[in-house]
Image: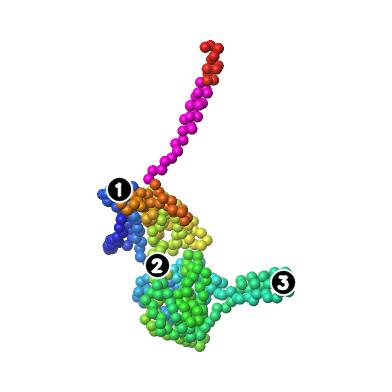
């Protein structure tokens, strides 16, 4: 009835499949009646670094923060200038999800890539990141029905056209989300900012840094990815050169933040993809491959071919059996995942019991149920009506047939 953790040291193992099995003695001693959860599975894949695209007009301090040894162990950083966003190569890679993270420093793409993003000093090209303009209500009591309809149409058209994002001067940071992985071990108490955009998070998002003027860092989900927006630039690049926009770059928390960003968007994303799954769940497979179809091989000769959809992912059904699954491309294994019955409620097949109301009575009875606000107390044995009409009906039918026979044979009797 306890939960404990055990560490298995697998030195030198870079890839493979793991199976943990409860011993027969332990299952017999516990009177186990459910065998499917007595085995657990895990996969070990080759540890590969992520791929990060850093697009900037030239930011030496940010390039230095992304070139530390710890960051290089997590991801390969590819630095490009904003003109690269117009190239055919970038569009193909971005549309096919080739990057784990794209950092846009003082630039924006024409459309969002199929990857996580982090914008620095710019707003994503999406209407949900821009505030809707306020439309004054019609107050005239003499307005006709036609005028009201026109006003409604005007309101809808105005709402569909986002307003410009506000930019403020010298905002003071007053609070930030220390528990979020992006800001772990990051201290922002003495940061000075010359100017910044206010980045109100869209629906479903969250503000991670708040200032006296409004949010400066926000995070929001997008079709399986996440977008982070940092409202202020580190160095403002202009035609005449560069200007310092914040003194954050010479604080210890600056390289820590960017290491957290790479770790959150790249390493943790890869861990979430490789984690175990529950039986019967539909899975969305993401790979670096651009193949049109993949083959998934599982336990009990399970084999299924999945097609690549328009979003660049593969939707897999039919994972009812716990076990290890291989994802193959042209006969080669490109990834693995495990399916386990890690559900305490499903594994607990014993009858729930509760002590009797009498403190002197040590017997146990079945636990009561609650339907709405009504408690339904369980009882051990409940009298039930026995259905005897069927045998009585058969007896009456037999008697009727016997009488019919006697009636037809009466002349011979």
Q: Which mark, by number, is residue 268?
A: 2
Q: Earlier in the sequence, mark 1 or mark 2?
A: 1
- For the residue labelled by badge 2, is the local secondary structure a helix, a strand or a loop? helix
Residue at x 41%, y 72% (from the top left corner): 180
- Provide the residue span drawn in magenta: 380-402
Q: Is residue 211 left or right of residue 131?
A: left
Q: Is residue 301 visible?
A: no
Q: Earlier in the sequence, mark 1 or mark 3?
A: 1
Q: State which quarter of the image contains the N terminus.
A: bottom left
Which residue occupies the foreground of this view, 9 or 74? Answer: 9
The chosen color scheme is: rainbow
Residue at x 40%, y 57% (from the top left corner): 277
- For the residue labelled by badge 3, is the local secondary structure a helix, a strand or a loop? helix
Q: Is residue 397 magenta?
A: yes
Local packing at callout 2 (Cα closer than 10 Å; few below 14, some 14-19, many 20+) is few
Q: Earlier in the sequence, mark 3 or mark 2?
A: 3
Measured from the top left, where is residue 397 in percent x and y? Answer: 51, 26
Measured from the top left, where is residue 334 in percent x and y? Answer: 40, 59
Camera-near label (3 vs 2) is 3
Q: Is residue 49 left or right of residue 146?
A: left
Which residue occupies the foreground of this view, 170 or 412? Answer: 412
- For the residue labelled by badge 1, is the local secondary structure a helix, a strand or a loop? loop
Mark 1 to mark 2 CA distance (whole Å): 39 Å
Question: Magenta region's main secondary structure?
Answer: helix
Measured from the top left, where is residue 32 in percent x and y? Answer: 31, 49
Residue for badge 1: 31
Camera-near label (1 vs 2) is 1
Q: Is 20 rendered above or below residue 174?
A: above
Residue for badge 3: 147
Residue at x 48%, y 65% (from the top left corner): 224
Q: Is 45 rendered above or below residue 389?
A: below
Q: Is residue 366 magenta?
A: no
């Amino acid at each position: 009835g306890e939960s404990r953790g055990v560490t298995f040291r697998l030195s030198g193992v870079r890839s493979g499949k793991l199976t943990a099995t409860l011993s027969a003695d332990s299952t017999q001693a516990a009177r186990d009646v459910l065998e499917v959860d007595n085995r657990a599975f895990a996969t070990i894949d080759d540890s590969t670094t992520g791929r990060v695209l850093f697009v900037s007009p030239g930011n030496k301090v940010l390039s230095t923060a992304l070139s530390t040894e710890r960051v290089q162990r997590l991801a390969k950083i590819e630095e490009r200038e904003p003109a690269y966003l117009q190239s055919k190569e970038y569009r193909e890679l971005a549309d096919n999800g080739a990057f784990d993270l794209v950092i846009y420093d003082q630039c924006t793409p024409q459309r969002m890539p199929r990857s996580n993003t982090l914008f620095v000093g710019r707003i994503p090209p999406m209407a949900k990141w821009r505030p809707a303009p306020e439309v004054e209500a019609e107050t005239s009591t003499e307005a006709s029905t036609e005028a009201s309809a026109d006003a409604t149409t005007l309101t809808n058209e105005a709402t569909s056209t986002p307003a410009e994002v506000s930019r403020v001067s010298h905002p003071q940071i007053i609070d930030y989300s220390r528990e979020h992985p992006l800001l772990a071990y990051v201290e922002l108490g003495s940061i000075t900012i010359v100017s910044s955009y206010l980045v109100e998070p869209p629906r479903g998002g969250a503000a991670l840094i708040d200032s006296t003027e409004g949010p400066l860092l926000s995070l929001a989900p997008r079709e399986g990815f996440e977008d982070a927006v940092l409202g202020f630039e580190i160095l403002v690049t202009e035609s005449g050169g560069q200007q310092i926009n914040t003194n954050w770059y010479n604080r210890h928390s600056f390289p820590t933040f960017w290491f957290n960003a790479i770790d959150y968007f790249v390493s943790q994303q890869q861990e979430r993809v490789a984690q175990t799954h529950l039986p019967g769940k539909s899975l969305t497979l993401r790979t670096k491959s651009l193949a049109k179809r993949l083959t998934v091989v599982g336990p009990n000769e399970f084999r299924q071919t999945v097609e690549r959809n328009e979003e660049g992912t593969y939707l897999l059904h039919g994972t009812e059996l716990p076990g290890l699954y291989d994802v193959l491309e042209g006969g080669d294994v490109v990834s693995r995942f495990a399916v386990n019955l890690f559900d305490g409620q499903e594994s607990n097949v014993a009858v729930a019991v509760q002590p009797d109301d009498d403190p002197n009575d040590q017997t146990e009875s079945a636990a009561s149920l609650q339907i709405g606000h009504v408690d339904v107390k369980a009882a051990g044995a409940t009298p039930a009506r026995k259905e005897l009409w069927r045998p009585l009906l058969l007896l009456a039918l037999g008697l009727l047939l016997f009488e019919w026979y006697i009636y037809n044979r009466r002349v011979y009797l």
